[in-house]
Image: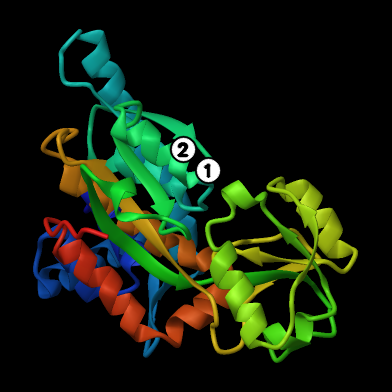
């Protein structure tokens, strides 16, 4: 009887993360027919179909979701075994990567991807809500890589000596309570929030404050900013009471709250992957970037409203795939 192997689990995970067999074959470095045949063998071993295929892509079946949950645990155990064995043997294979980031929802998955794809990597993180402070940490060598947004008020000298790659460009959603009168058909018109109280991060942490003010002005009103907070629990309580806030598209709020797209997508943000030009954290730099792109792609399904929006914008899906295929291209801001 054929047996399931770790490479089979990695193949299943790649298909789930990329949303198609063709994209997964590119990531795995094998041909699409070979991956298709491998999936059929895996499904025969497991006794059922793992994915549903449609015009919107490839999505896990109930059996596929079950297998993915167990596969992630097994792959994590194997990574832990390898790293522990390397440390036990006192080899010099373990490298350290210090990751700085502004609060982004992809960070947990990013760390998982790093551990899975770069064996022996020791990852340390530094969260910093102020983007300018994060750039200083990077330029002075306190961190090796930074994940951040392209933010308002930056000047060219802020990026001197840094290599910047666009990771993703996405719309900014609005955090709002279920049943809010501004919700129409799963979207919210910015103009319909003219009478709402807004919650924003403190100005030094708000990377899109200038664009937000301009978008509100174009919609015909000045936003009524009543609360400054970066703390999710506080914001959630205020939203439940009728306030609104800007939200990352992949946000998965607690019951009773929603993260919904703004009609016409008036606000966008670009996520950046930044390194120092004078310090390459090792030959795995491109693989680190690849991990960040994969983490971003997997974050889309956190919020069903973002997943639906994403399916309606195939051009962004293609850009995501292009970044995986051209990881050696460094783009300056």
Q: Judge left or right: residue 158 versus residue 90.
A: right
Could you tell me residue 124's position as x and y percent?
A: 39, 28
Residue at the far right: name it. 241
Q: How is the image coloured?
A: rainbow
Q: Which residue is mark 2?
A: 133
| Relative to 213, residue 117 above or below | above
Instruction: State the separation of the CA atoms marked 2 and 1.
Output: 5 Å
User: Quick one: SS at disc 1?
Assistant: loop
Point 38% across, 35% down: residue = 136
Q: Quadrant of the C terminus?
A: bottom left
| Relative to 197, residue 67 above or below | above
Point 47% across, 51% down: residue = 69
Q: Which residue is mark 1?
A: 130
- Nearest the eye: 308 or 143: 143
Q: Judge left or right: residue 166 versus residue 69.
A: left
Could you tell me residue 53's position as x and y percent?
A: 36, 82
Point 50% across, 51% down: residue = 104
Could you tell me residue 77's position as x and y percent?
A: 37, 32
Displayed quadrant of residue 122:
top left
* Residue 48 visible (yes or no): no
- Nearest the eye: 182 or 155: 155
User: Quick one: SS at disc 2?
Assistant: helix
Mark 1 crowdedness (10 Å alpha carbons): few <14, some 14-19, many ≥20: some
Q: What is the total number of numbered labels drawn onto the structure image?
A: 2
Q: Confirm or deny contact between disc 2 and disc 1 (CB under 8 A).
A: yes
Displayed quadrant of residue 46:
bottom left
């Amino acid at each position: 009887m054929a047996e399931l192997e770790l490479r089979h689990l990695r193949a299943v995970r790649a298909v789930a993360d990329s949303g198609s067999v063709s994209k997964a074959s590119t990531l795995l470095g094998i041909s699409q027919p070979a991956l298709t045949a491998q999936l059929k063998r895996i499904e025969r071993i497991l006794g059922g179909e793992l994915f549903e295929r449609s015009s919107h892509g490839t999505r896990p079946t109930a059996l596929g979701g079950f297998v993915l949950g167990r596969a992630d645990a097994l792959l994590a155990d194997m990574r832990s075994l390898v790293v522990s064995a390397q440390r036990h043997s006192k080899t010099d294979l373990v490298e350290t990567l210090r990751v700085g980031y502004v609060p982004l929802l992809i960070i947990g998955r990013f760390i998982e991807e790093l551990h899975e794809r770069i064996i022996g990597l020791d990852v340390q993180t530094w969260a910093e809500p102020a983007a300018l402070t994060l750039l200083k940490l990077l330029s002075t060598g306190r961190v090796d890589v930074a994940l951040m947004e392209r933010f308002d008020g930056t000047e060219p000298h802020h990026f001197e000596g840094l290599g910047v790659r666009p990771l993703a460009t996405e719309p900014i959603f609005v955090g709002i309570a279920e049943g809010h009168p501004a919700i129409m058909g799963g979207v919210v018109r910015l103009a319909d929030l003219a009478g709402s109280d807004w919650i924003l991060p403190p100005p030094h942490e708000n990377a899109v404050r200038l664009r937000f003010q301009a978008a509100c002005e174009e919609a015909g009103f000045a936003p009524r900013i009543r609360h400054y907070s970066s703390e999710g629990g506080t914001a959630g309580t205020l939203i439940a009471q009728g306030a609104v806030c800007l939200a990352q598209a992949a946000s998965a709020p607690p019951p009773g709250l929603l993260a919904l797209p703004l009609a016409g997508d008036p606000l966008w943000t670009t996520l950046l992957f930044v390194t120092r030009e004078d310090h390459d954290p090792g030959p795995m730099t491109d693989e680190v970037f690849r991990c960040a792109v994969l983490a971003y792609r997997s974050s889309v399904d956190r919020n069903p409203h973002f997943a639906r929006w994403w399916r309606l914008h195939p051009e962004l899906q293609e850009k995501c795939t292009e970044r995986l295929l051209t990881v050696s291209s460094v783009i300056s801001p």
